[in-house]
Image (tube, rainbow, N blue to C red):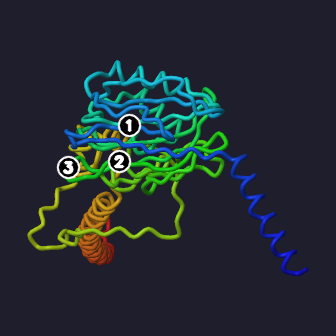
Amino acid sequence: MRVLRKSLLAILIVFSCMVVNAQIEQVPFVIHGTGAYHSNYRMLKIGDREVYHAGGRGLRLTILLKTDYSIVSDQEFDTYGSTIACDNLATKLNALNKGQIGVLTSYDAWELNLSDNLITAFMRLGLTKAAVTEKTCRRPYAAIFEGATAGEESSKAVEVSFMNTPNQPFAEIRGYLSEGSFVASGTSPNALSRPQGDGAELIVDYRGNVGVGTIKPKHKFEVAGTIRAKEIKVDSNDWPDYVFEEDYKLKSLEEVEQFVKVHKHLPGIVPAKKVEQEGVALAEMNKLLLQKVEELTLYSITLSKENQELKGKVASQKEDIKSIEMKLQKLIKVVNAKPQKEEY
């Protein structure tokens, strides 16, 4: 009896799995994007159907319906040769809605003329690698992503991108479509999105620059906002203790005054307009400020010596005046002590 029960339970489990699998259809797909592989084509295969296996410079966008994975549109855009093509692709991407899935593949070159409109469209759909790629050429690229209602952002995307050298592999994504979405393999993302998935807040570009609040960091670490820290340590060379060397040429205060009248800032200090345009390098500014403090110290020492010298002269003059006063008083006493002649 126990054996029969176990057999019936096993059959029931197998039958349940078959029912679940029948209800949850999983359609496999393979995506290839190519770059410096001039003799190989990009490819999109969904289930047993090969959607394309072809060339055509630039990016190719295929839009699928989530309901049955049928193709809504399939179009090539020469994003390498034309900014108009880039803007047309941006328009197409911005038209994707939440009921659609997009697939992008590259062939040959695609990066040179990426327009601001296209970069914005990439970012809206979580295609952060495409958005910050180097504007050279022939990088293999592939992506699969979900659409979003116009004006909203999404981060449900898988991207693959490699270097533009002949030895790089395909930008390949494998996975399956299931229940109106997808599960896919890809390379590590280059961005961190907000918890709700509506936009990237931290991004790493092709140079390794990290941007927080910006997708175009010009420095190794760039923040479009406020940073709070207990301490910031900045490495610096050529610390300005050379100000105290014997051969340091300290400007006279008259020279400094003349410079300030003409230029409206201290010698060696960055003017306000340049700071507004380019910002301030903390290490360099700290050195300059210390240099000015040390120069002020030298001026103060010089003025202190001159002041002491003047005090000495004043004290000496006071002694001289006191001595003269004493002599004058003695003279007055002598004059007053002389007998007066009687008048007849």
Which label lies toward us, 2 or 3? Answer: 2
Q: Which mark is residue 105?
A: 1
Would residue 71 be seen by someone viewing this image from the given angle? Answer: yes
Q: Secondary structure at mark 3?
A: loop
* Front one among 148 and 280: 148
Kind of residue at badge 2: Ala
Image marks 2 and 1: residues in contact by CB distance under 8 Å? yes
- Please report whichever mark, 1 or 3, sits nearer to the chain's N-terminal start: 1
Kind of residue at badge 3: Thr
- Please report whichever mark, 2 or 1, sits nearer to the chain's N-terminal start: 1
Q: Residue at x 83, y 76 (%)?
A: 6
Q: Residue at x 35, y 31 (%)?
A: 59
How packed mark 3 is, by other alpha carbons closer than 10 Å (few <14, some 14-19, many 20 or more), is: some
Q: Secondary structure at mark 2?
A: strand
Quarter of the rendering occupied by the C terminus: bottom left
Q: Secondary structure at mark 1?
A: strand
Task: Give residue 177's quadrant in the image.
Answer: top right
Q: Which mark is residue 165?
A: 3
Q: Which mark is residue 171?
A: 2
Q: Residue furthest bottom?
A: 2
Kind of residue at badge 1: Thr
Is residue 81 shown left or right of residue 116? Answer: left
* Front one among 162 and 315: 162
